[in-house]
Image (tube, helix red, strand yellow):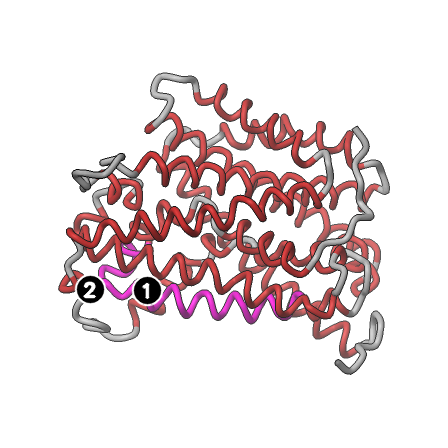
């Protein structure tokens, strides 16, 4: 199978790639993570602030990429900081995407084994999804984008419908008082939101593949806005229905919310199955684009064909995914990835943007 790397993405496809990348495993665990960190029901404020910060960082990434039309981060990095440091940053970015893909595929396997395929070996579930992801990524970024265009609208409709059905057990008092403990818990919870917004960094390669790179900021803003909205709905409905204490005691609070009520008289009385299936598709989407991005980066650094590298990275990602011994270690691994995202992607991208402006690297931006 020949991997096409010259196809261009529409602005809509760029938007759905960013949104699907962000809507991974975080939505299943975010309420518990914020509840443990903040001890207050103000997580929705943290989600808004964290989303806006990520949006600004994402815009900086787009502006950086627009300085080097048609080139990804792995190609133009060395033009800013030199060949040696540029290749080092590229390799670190490849490792980051590999770790993120391993984390997502492991979370998907854990959830699948717990709720759908009880008793199935973890390694079997991971290998099955990885081979499907390899088949998708082998076609290039356009088949990935076309699949995302199908998955995202379905996810949005099913998720909002499922959350709306929980209104009978929703209690607004569980969200009060607003800022009862001040602003410090909100600030303390910002760090916990970084991992759930992992995905903005995909613009490091998507901008180069857009038909209209000048629409990169638009794609970033809208692509980030959709997850922000869904995460706000998640936090409000889950904490409002289960309370802070109930959320802290749950490993997968969003799924447990769906299991905590029944709607009599409908064709289906339990709805966690639909949400679970849709979110497995979302996590699979995140894994696929991570695997593709890591493979593309390594192929451009080494100046080799991408398809053999996809096969090469597959067993490495599998081994990394199997490293955590339990769910707690898996969540610690996720926190580690979130910390790496702050410094390697966010901070480095801003520094590179400033350097490209100061030293006048790349193309001169045209007035829009």
Mark 1 Cα-neighbour bin, 10 Å: few <14, some 14–19, many ≥20: many
Q: What is the quadrant of the C terminus in the image?
A: bottom right
Q: Which residue is at the front of the view, 221 or 58?
A: 221
Q: Earlier in the sequence, mark 2 or mark 1?
A: 1
Q: Which residue is at the front of the view, 16 or 95?
A: 16
In terms of secondary structure, where does tag 2 sit?
A: helix
**Residue 205: where, in percent of width, then height?**
71, 54
Q: What is the quadrant of the N terminus in the image?
A: top right
- Residue drawn at (47%, 33%), measured in percent from left and top? 106
Q: Name the mark on residue 84.
A: none
Residue 251 in the figure: left or right of residue 364:
left
Residue position for label 1: 44
Quarter of the image for residue 325 reads top left
Q: CA distance from mark 2 to mark 1?
A: 10 Å
| Dot 2 and dot 1 residues touching (CB under 8 Å) | yes
Identify whether 92 is placed above or below 287.
below
- Residue drawn at (29%, 51%), measured in percent from left and top? 163
Residue position for label 2: 175
Q: Which residue is at the front of the view, 8 or 358?
A: 8
Residue 44 in the figure: left or right of residue 198:
left
In terms of secondary structure, where does tag 1 sit?
A: helix
- Residue drawn at (55%, 50%), measured in percent from left and top? 21
- Residue drawn at (33%, 55%), measured in percent from left and top? 234
**Residue 169: where, in percent of width, then height?**
15, 51
Quarter of the image for residue 314 reads top right
Label total for image: 2
**Residue 149: where, in percent of width, then height?**
58, 48
Question: Is residue 43 within the magenta segment?
Answer: yes
**Residue 150: where, in percent of width, then height?**
55, 45
Name of the residue lying farthest toward the bottom: 367
Stretch in magenta:
34-62
């Amino acid at each position: 199978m020949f991997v096409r790397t010259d196809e261009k993405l529409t602005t809509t496809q760029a938007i759905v790639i960013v949104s699907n990348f962000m809507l991974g495993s975080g939505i299943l665990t975010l309420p518990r993570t914020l509840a443990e960190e903040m001890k207050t029901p103000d997580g929705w404020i943290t989600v808004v602030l964290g989303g806006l910060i990520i949006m600004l960082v994402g815009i900086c990434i787009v502006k950086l990429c627009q300085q080097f039309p048609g080139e990804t981060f792995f190609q133009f990095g060395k033009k800013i900081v030199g060949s040696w440091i540029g290749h080092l940053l590229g390799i670190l970015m490849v490792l980051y995407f590999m770790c993120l893909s391993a984390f997502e595929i492991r979370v998907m396997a854990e959830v699948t084994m717990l709720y759908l395929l009880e008793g199935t070996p973890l390694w079997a579930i991971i290998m099955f999804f990885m081979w499907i992801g390899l088949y998708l990524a082998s076609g290039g970024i356009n088949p990935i984008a076309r699949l995302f265009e199908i998955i995202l609208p379905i996810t949005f409709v099913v998720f909002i419908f499922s959350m709306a059905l929980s209104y009978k057990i929703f209690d607004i008092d569980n969200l009060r008082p607003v800022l009862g403990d001040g602003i410090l818990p909100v600030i303390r919870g910002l760090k916990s939101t970084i991992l759930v917004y992992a995905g903005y960094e995909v613009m490091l390669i998507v901008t180069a593949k857009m038909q209209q790179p000048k629409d990169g900021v638009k794609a970033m803003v809208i692509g980030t806005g959709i997850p922000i909205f869904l995460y706000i709905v998640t936090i409000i409905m889950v904490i409002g229905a289960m309370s802070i204490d109930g959320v802290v005691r749950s490993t997968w609070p969003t799924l447990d919310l769906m299991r905590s009520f029944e709607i009599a008289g409908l064709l289906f009385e339990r709805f966690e199955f639909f949400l679970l299936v849709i979110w497995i598709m979302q996590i699979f989407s995140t894994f696929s684009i991570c695997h593709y991005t890591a493979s593309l980066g390594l192929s451009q650094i080494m100046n080799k064909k991408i398809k053999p590298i996809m096969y090469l990275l597959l067993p490495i990602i599998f081994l990394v995914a199997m490293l955590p011994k339990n769910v707690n270690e898996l969540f610690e691994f996720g926190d580690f990835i979130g910390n790496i995202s702050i410094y390697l992607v966010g901070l480095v991208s801003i520094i590179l943007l400033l350097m490209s402006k100061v030293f006048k690297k790349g193309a001169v931006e045209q007035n829009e």
